[in-house]
């Protein structure tokens, strides 16, 4: 195996059926990796595998997985060891959903449980169940896909913000626990990436229309984000904040926390709908809770 973690990896990618998950899987294949492509829509995952086969490099298999279901995640970990011919060396927790619009108090418990089950609990399962394999593998890595919503605190995005903030905290805690080891941890925090998260998630009304517009006209390509994230992971970087607007939010929130919160509230009142889209990121709807 190459000294670069993304080269010739034994990889698992959740939410691999579309969006940035598909981009990760295809880029890993270009780097000579073997990839287990997991998605709740196994037909989409199979399409990703077909695209990889057309590339003529790398090897992949599609598998059904609802990341919010711990039994599915246990089955994924078991199949990974079989298909990859050894312990997983690169785990990419990518599957997630978009949700936004109503303020806290009007979101509804069902939507809170749906969003946190996928966006946060799925990441916890992926980390908890795959870290033993990663440690066994040696020179390896874990990539968790969060969002600029993890630190932007955009109004109208509370359920999404809370899940992504949890992913950021989870990734930072794992990185601290593994400090000095040969296991790298990277957390990706983008703003707009060209995917279908707005139309496939639970984003309502004007917020959805603005999100679609911004993704179409200002979003970065999923392929570019995946490629840059893997390169950063190879260099051992913890944070990947790929866009200028995300980095500006990151700095403003830390340097002027009170002014930032006041400004976000004013923006919400002056431009209804804009605040609802500030944290929507690269992920497309790739999993749902079990029926």
Image (cartoon, rainbow, N blue to C red):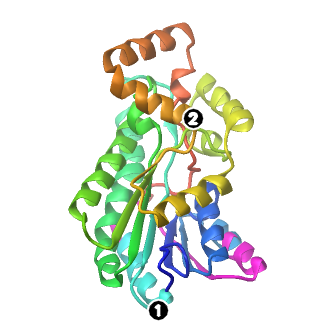
Residue 261 horizontal/vertical position (percent): 37, 17
Q: Is residue 159 among the parts visible in the rendering?
A: no
Q: Dot 2, crowdedness within 10 Å: few (<14), some or many (≥20)?
A: few
In depth, the one of 56 and 201 nearer the eye is 56
Q: Which mark is residue 17?
A: none
Q: Earlier in the sequence, mark 1 or mark 2?
A: 1
Separation of residues labelled 1 and 2 (CA atoms): 40 Å
In depth, the one of 92 and 141 nearer the eye is 141
Q: Nearer the viewer, mark 1 or mark 2?
A: 2
Secondary structure under badge 2? helix
In depth, the one of 16 and 89 nearer the eye is 89
Q: Is residue 280 left or right of residue 54?
A: left
Q: Which residues are magenta?
A: 48-72
The answer to whether mark 1 and mark 2 are in CB contact below 8 A is no
| Residue for badge 2 | 244
Residue 244 horizontal/vertical position (percent): 57, 35
Say which quadrant the C terminus sits in: bottom left
Identify the residue at image location x=51%, y=68%.
13
Q: Is residue 274 left or right of residue 84?
A: right
Eyeballing the image, is 155 above or below 192? above
Identify the residue at image location x=32%, y=73%.
182
Identify the residue at image location x=50%, y=76%.
11
Q: Is residue 270 among the parts visible in the rendering?
A: yes
| Residue for badge 1 | 85
Q: Quadrant of residue 141?
A: bottom left
- Of all residues, the one furthest to the left in this rendering is 177
Q: Is residue 222 left or right of residue 290?
A: right
Secondary structure under badge 1? loop
């Amino acid at each position: 195996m190459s000294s670069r973690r993304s080269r010739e990896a034994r990889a698992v990618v959740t939410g691999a059926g579309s969006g940035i998950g598909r981009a990760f899987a295809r880029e890993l294949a270009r780097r000579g990796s073997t990839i287990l492509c997991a998605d709740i829509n196994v037909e989409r995952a199979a399409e990703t595998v077909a695209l990889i086969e057309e590339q003529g490099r790398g090897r992949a298999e599609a598998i059904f997985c609802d990341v919010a279901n711990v039994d599915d995640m246990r089955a994924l970990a078991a199949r990974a060891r079989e298909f990859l011919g050894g312990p997983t060396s690169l785990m990419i927790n990518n599957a997630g959903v978009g949700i936004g619009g109503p303020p806290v108090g009007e979101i509804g418990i069902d939507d809170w449980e749906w969003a946190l089950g996928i966006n946060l609990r799925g990441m916890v399962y992926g980390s908890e169940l795959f870290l033993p394999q990663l440690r066994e593998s040696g020179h390896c890595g874990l990539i968790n896909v969060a969002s600029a919503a993890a630190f932007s605190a955009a109004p109208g995005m509370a359920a999404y913000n809370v899940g992504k903030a949890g992913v950021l905290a989870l990734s930072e805690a794992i990185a601290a626990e593994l400090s000095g080891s040969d296991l790298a941890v990277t957390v990706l925090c983008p703003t707009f990436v060209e995917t279908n998260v707005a139309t496939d998630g639970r984003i309502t009304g004007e917020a959805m229309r603005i999100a679609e517009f911004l993704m179409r006209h200002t979003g970065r390509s999923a392929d570019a984000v995946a490629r840059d994230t893997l390169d950063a992971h190879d260099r051992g970087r913890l944070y990947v904040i790929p866009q200028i607007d995300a980095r500006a939010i990151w700095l403003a929130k830390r340097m002027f926390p009170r002014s930032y919160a006041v400004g976000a509230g004013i923006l919400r009142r002056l431009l209804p709908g804009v605040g609802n889209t500030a944290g929507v990121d690269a992920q497309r709807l790739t999993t749902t809770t079990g029926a």
